[in-house]
Amino acid sequence: MTNRRLNYWARFWALAGLLYFFVPMYGTLDFSLRMKKGVLSLFAYQVVLSNPQFLASFRYSAIMGVITVVVSTLIFLPTIYWIYLRLPRIRPVVEIITILPFIIPVIVYVFGLIRTFGRPPLQLTLTPFKTDILITAGYVVLSMPYMYRSIDVGMRAIDVRTLTEAAQSLGAGWRQILLKVIVPNLRIAILSGALITFALVMGELILGDFLVRPALGPYMVQVGRDRAYEPAALAMLSYGLTWLCLGLIQLVTRGGTSQQQLTGR
Amino acid sequence: MAFLELTHVSKSFPGSVAVDDFNLSAEQGEFVSFLGPSGCGKTTTLRMIAGFEIPTSGTITLDGQDLTFVTPNKRNVGMVFQSYALFPNMTVKDNIGFGLDIAGRKKNEIAARVEEMLGLIHLDEFGARYPAQLSGGQQQRVALARALAIRPQVLLLDEPLSALDAKIRLELRQEIRRIQQQLGITTIYVTHDQEEALSLSDRVVVMSEGRIEQVGTPSTIYNYPRSEFVAKFVGQINLLTVEMVNLEKGLVKVGQQLVHAGQTLEHMNGHKIRLAVRPEELNPGFRENANNLSGKVEAVTYLGSIVRVRLDIEGNAVSLDMFNERKLQIPNVGSPLTITFPVDACWLL
């Protein structure tokens, strides 16, 4: 009897959660299809996708997303590897540092960036190229909690120290150990972190807006101010992109729970 | 100069000395075991030979070359770990061929060596499998083959059988010895299992608190332990409190009962001494021209091939091992029992 009641409540709350999530989404989708009076059409999507400004901002954010993924992987992977290998005691401190982007509001962070790098000696806001370096660094910091955690979980699943020592005893140097042993065993962890980072950069608003770069986030806000149906279509496209990333994460992590199984077959 | 030499090697960590003045010479093809309890420094010593730890002082030479500060990947030393440490992303073949690939060997040469190694460990059919698809024993065989594939000058094994169940452990132990003798490779084996050390090794190094307690062949270590620690750690031992009676004749008293210690006691005058005798040297009954002691049976433990009887002799707990046979008369708990042992079966510590 008690179990049945529990089951009932569990289903009720699951349904309530789904409705809370899907009803607004359905509303947005429905609205995005009503640009042409009296018929359901993909006209709003057509308008959005054919707008050169959208394509430019999408391309810009996608490129920045890829660069951010590469830079953050190059920074975090060797750092976390070294912490596991040689400095395990500082792990709690590093974990606290990595969650700072959750604690410090992005607006505060971006003002800090502008104040520090908007004036000599390290003025990085004078040219678009330099600002892109600054914005990439900003994205890397924002992606830190996700990238760190993904790689950290991967490292926990393998015995990093013993694998390293085994490779060393077989004659491998640091580069070979990282590329042939560590990275292949962290493939899924790195991919997960990379996809989340990419999705984050694609939707990021404040850094792009305040550093005046043609990113997708500020473009979506601008369209939202000026138009009616296109923002709904853009929101749905943004959802789609995020879900695509999540779907890819599911796809690459499919087939088992242990790192050994995942990488071993 | 010996093939592998550790000279005055010490290793300190903040607040503790892990290895203190360790000296060892191992000849080519020799099988040496480091035996001792947890924290005695045996693994640290092995890791210094492998290059994973740098000695605080002392030198390590291999075939005349000073290795003390050489990085692990330049030592040509094969290592087998307790946790196998196979690369999960690689097949058995790739694991075994890893070291050769790193060394830049040709593909056909690697393939031939891998096949040879697979044959050596009797896993010819398992080359395409991943480590997760193998049992613990099979994984450790692969780890052994991987370490041997690079033709190392020394093979280091760090408690390689600890994670395996008893039956596999016994099988693999014989396998390791067979392969080591077949290849004639100098091997250093770390274990806390005395049976493993005694059955595998040419020589055993017994360690305690970072220091060498005794080095010797398995029979020397077992039959002639130089310290109470070695006597207690390797095998079972009875240590009886004795009082000196006649220094010249080597007579001592256990309570009120006289025992001939089989040696003069002059050099031990003034020392607190104990009489040591192994449980398997003791027999029930009385014999002329032998040591005899009487006591009371306190407990009888049935261990399969052995029946262990615990006696109280003048306040000393004494164990006696009797080989089990169907008609064995097991003494009753609480009954008096006289035990006998040859004079040369005991010694003083």
Image (cartoon, rainbow, N blue to C red):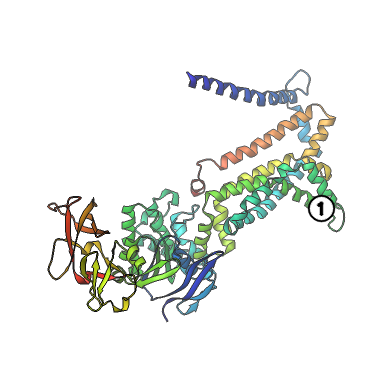
User: Which one is in front, A100 or B248?
Assistant: B248
What's the chain of the residue with tag 1?
A: A
Question: Is A235 placed left or right of B59 in the picture?
Answer: right
Q: Residue at x 34, y 70 (%)?
A: B272
Image: A94 above or below B117 = above
User: Which one is in front, A86 or B74?
Assistant: A86
Q: Residue at x 79, y 51 (%)?
A: A134
Q: Residue furthest bottom?
A: B1
Q: Position of residue B134 (x, y in %)?
A: 40, 50
User: Which one is in front, A35 or A178?
Assistant: A178
Q: Residue at x 81, y 49 (%)?
A: A113
Determine the image quadrant of residue B295.
bottom left
From where the camera sits, is residue B292 visible? yes
Where does label 1 land, which residue? Answer: A129
Question: Is A146 placed left or right of A32 in the picture?
Answer: left
**Amino acid of disc 1:** Phe
Q: Position of residue A199 (x, y in %)?
A: 69, 41
Q: Position of residue B206 (x, y in %)?
A: 38, 68
Q: Residue at x 77, y 42 (%)?
A: A106
Question: Is B345 placed left or right of B139 in the picture?
Answer: left
For the image, the number of numbered tags is 1
